[in-house]
Amino acid sequence: YYNFAAGPAMLPVEVIAQIKEDLPVYKNSGMSVMEISHRSKLYQDLYEETKADMLDLMKLDPAEYDVLFLTGGATQQFTTIPLNIARKYRRIALVDSGHWAQRAGEDAQKLPNLEVDTVASAKDNNYTAVPEIPTVFAKDYDYVHITTNNTIMGTAYRDDQVPDLDLPLVADMSSNFLGQVYDFNKFDLIYAGAQKNLAPAGLTVLIIKKDLLVKHDDLPGYFDFATEAAKKSALNTPPVFQVYVAGLALKWLKKQGGVAGIAKVNQEKADLLYNTLAETKNFESKVDENSRSIMNVPFVTGNPDLDAEFVKEAEAHHLLNLKGHRLVGGMRASIYNAMPLEGVQALCDFIKDFDAKH
Ligand code: PLP
């Protein structure tokens, strides 16, 4: 079976195997890994190691960046980030690359006295390509918000399409977090829901430049990044199990050669799939070649009945969750870090077979 869901998504089989081992008793503690306390030394060690591994994989200096392990999903950050960071000008520059970027803008816009300006949009190309990120701005902004990978449309920025800006750059990396090479130093704040490329749902990671960690007394502690950082993300009960799984996934990632190592495999998987689609008579990808995501690949036949037949038959061939997002229809194959090349090969074989029969 291969699970092509956009999230919650596949975890590496090696990670699942380790969880099975730790599930009854974790490190001779007499407790299941699901039962360990966030105040225990076991968790404190796990937290420190996971944080260190993450910064190491991202090639970020721990003296400059901190990591927060939060809950509430990427969605909660649409509100919490402006609460913390949009304080001087109360104005955000939003790059509208698709649905989730718009959601981030809409939620920020609900905060009092806060302005969200869309400074670039992919609306004109119907979101089939990412809009260029501006480097010069007509007004003062507290930060620029981008979405590095657009889960629904299947577009993404490559590292060379992300400029080094003079003002803070905030990125929603939910759907390509640690799956693609970026110079992470270009970013001042990165956030991601863990359920696509890292851990089960319930954990949100936030990597933040330490100079942004300013305590705001008007914010409840839970929403204040500086307070969360001072409390080592344990102001209240953190998602211990999810942090543990993230820790395993990061160790696994190191074994794959880190971000550069896995990104090479991810590119190979994506190339295989895009090339296969291009060779068929029934299927096509609508995404501009220069903006192709290597994580989420939507494709269509143009005939909803045929799409439905494809998805149903694919399930019967153990290729799961290929139905496209309701906003775009058709199919979508999410091929995150944990999806092996063999999974994509199996999908491509099935696509070719289906194409020959229709
Ligand atoms: N941002 C992006 C790019 C996403 O793909 C998603 C979910 O699919 C979200 C945000 C929302 O994430 P969450 O469900 O963790 O709030």
Image (cartoon, rainbow, N blue to C red):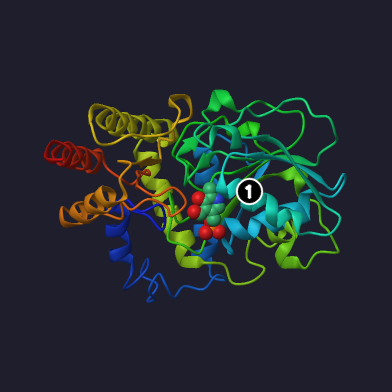
Query: Would residue 290 be found to the left or right of residue 357 on screen?
Result: right
Q: Is residue 67 visible?
A: no
Amino acid carrying label 1: it is Gln
| Image quarter of the C terminus | top left
Q: Is residue 61 above or below residue 107?
A: above
Along the viewing direction, whichever of 14 and 343 lies nearer the viewer: 343
Q: Is residue 160 visible?
A: yes
x and y, in percent, of residue 91 in the image? 82, 45
x and y, in percent, of residue 131 in the image? 60, 31
Query: Would residue 311 be found to the left or right of residue 237 on screen?
Result: left
Give the number of marks. Answer: 1
| Image quarter of the N terminus | bottom left
Q: Is residue 260 above or below residue 28?
A: above
Residue neighbourhood size for the residue with mark 1, other residues' Cα within 10 Å, grouped as few (<14), some (14–19), many (≥20): some
x and y, in percent, of residue 267 in the image? 36, 30
Along the viewing direction, whichever of 72 and 314 lies nearer the viewer: 314
Query: Would residue 222 be found to the left or right of residue 219 on screen?
Result: left
Q: Is mark 1 within 8 Å of ligand 1?
A: no
Q: Residue at x 28, y 65 (%)?
A: 20
Q: Residue at x 76, y 28 (%)?
A: 166
**Residue that badge 1 annotates:** 102
Q: Residue at x 34, y 33 (%)?
A: 270
Quadrant position of residue 268: top left
x and y, in percent, of residue 117 in the image? 76, 42
Q: Secondary structure at mark 1?
A: helix
Along the viewing direction, whichever of 343 and 151 lies nearer the viewer: 151
Quadrant position of residue 59: top right
